[in-house]
Image (tube, rainbow, N blue to C red):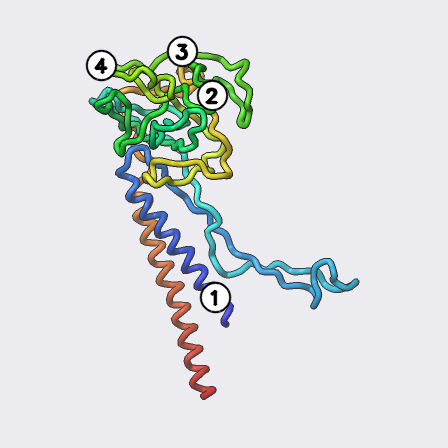
């Protein structure tokens, strides 16, 4: 009986996590380029050993171990669903949308060595603007990176067209020098912007990562992702050929791929499951109280 209560508590914890994910997805319906998060549920297993010693020390003829599914529900993982949101028009020249997979690259500070910069974050939220010094910035002040951004050498004025994840070779890359042109950009640009890998008037960098699930939320919110240890280095790629590669769409923004009509009923279901499992725990506690009363 005590094991049933333990498994019910574990299930309650998983349902509580699920509720948090659903609420985040509901909030994300109003965010530019938000990607819905989906949990992966599983049942915890327990092993009944076939002998007192078990494992490799099991005596000859002893029955094998038996793995029995547990009654508790757990969340193994939470992964983003990278399905593209709708692309809608905007009146702002610096509002950009990615038609295809990939991310814009943004950094928190420009005061660091561009080769050693490790604080790169990834976003599909292209709601950018020019600051008073001529830098392209996000809504919360992050700097938008160009195609010269590391790990490629600063003098390499292009993105690889068919790079393999993990490669360190800078040779045999298809170089494309097309630009994302802007009209009416600020007239003043510090001379070293281009070298340092930050956007001046006409370059915007994109990247892919080997594993989207290896990205996690950053301190800047759910639409600004950072690289987790398991994802590997970013993979940069060509953005100049719309027939074979992703393109940047000007005066446009990508909507969230999260839907109220999907997640409101899901939240109701999670609430009912929470109430049902709570009832199991309440019945167990009541039974324990009755048993303690009989013992006394």
Q: Which mark is residue 6?
A: 1
**Residue beneath disc 3:** 177
- Circle nearer the N terminus (4, 3): 3
Mark 3 lies on a secondary structure that is loop
Disc 2 to disc 4, C-alpha distance: 28 Å
Location of residue 105 in the rendering, given as x and y in whole percent from the top left corner: 38, 27
Instruction: Say which residue appears at 35% left-offset and 13% top-offset.
Output: 179
| Front-lying residue, 267 or 210 | 210
Identify the residue at the far bottom of this view. 296
- Circle nearer the N terminus (1, 4): 1
| Front-lying residue, 97 or 207 | 207
Q: Are marks 1 and 4 in contact (CB under 8 Å)?
A: no
Locate residue 240 relative to residue 185 in the image: left or right. Answer: right
Q: Which mark is residue 145?
A: none
| Quarter-of-image position of residue 64 | bottom right
Disc 1 to disc 3, C-alpha distance: 61 Å
Q: Which mark is residue 152?
A: 2
């Amino acid at each position: 009986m005590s094991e049933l209560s333990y498994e019910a508590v574990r299930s309650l914890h998983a349902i509580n996590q699920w509720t948090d994910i659903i609420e985040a997805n509901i909030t994300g319906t109003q965010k530019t380029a938000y990607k819905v998060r989906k949990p992966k549920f599983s049942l915890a297993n327990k092993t009944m050993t076939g002998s007192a010693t078990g494992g490799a020390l099991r005596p000859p003829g002893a029955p094998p171990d038996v793995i029995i599914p547990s009654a508790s529900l757990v969340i193994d993982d939470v992964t983003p669903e990278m399905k593209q949101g709708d692309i809608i028009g905007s009146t702002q020249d610096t509002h950009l949308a990615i038609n295809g997979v990939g991310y814009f690259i943004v950094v928190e500070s420009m005061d660091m060595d561009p080769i050693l910069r490790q604080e790169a974050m990834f976003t599909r939220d292209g709601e950018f603007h020019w600051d008073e010094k001529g830098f392209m910035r996000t809504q919360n002040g992050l700097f938008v990176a160009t195609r010269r951004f590391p790990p490629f050498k600063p003098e390499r004025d292009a993105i690889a067209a068919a790079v393999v994840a993990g490669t360190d070779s800078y040779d045999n890359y298809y170089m494309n020098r097309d630009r994302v042109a802007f009209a009416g950009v600020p007239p003043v640009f510090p001379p070293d912007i281009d070298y340092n890998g930050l956007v001046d008037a006409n370059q915007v960098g994109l990247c892919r990562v080997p594993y989207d699930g290896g990205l996690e939320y950053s301190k800047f919110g759910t639409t600004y992702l950072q690289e987790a240890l398991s994802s590997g280095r970013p993979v940069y790629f060509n953005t100049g050929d719309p027939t074979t590669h992703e393109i940047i769409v000007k005066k446009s923004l990508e909507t969230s791929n999260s839907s109220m009509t999907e997640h409101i009923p899901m939240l109701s279901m999670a609430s009912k499951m929470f109430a049902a499992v709570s009832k199991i725990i309440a019945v167990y506690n009541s039974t324990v109280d009755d048993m303690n009363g009989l013992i006394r």
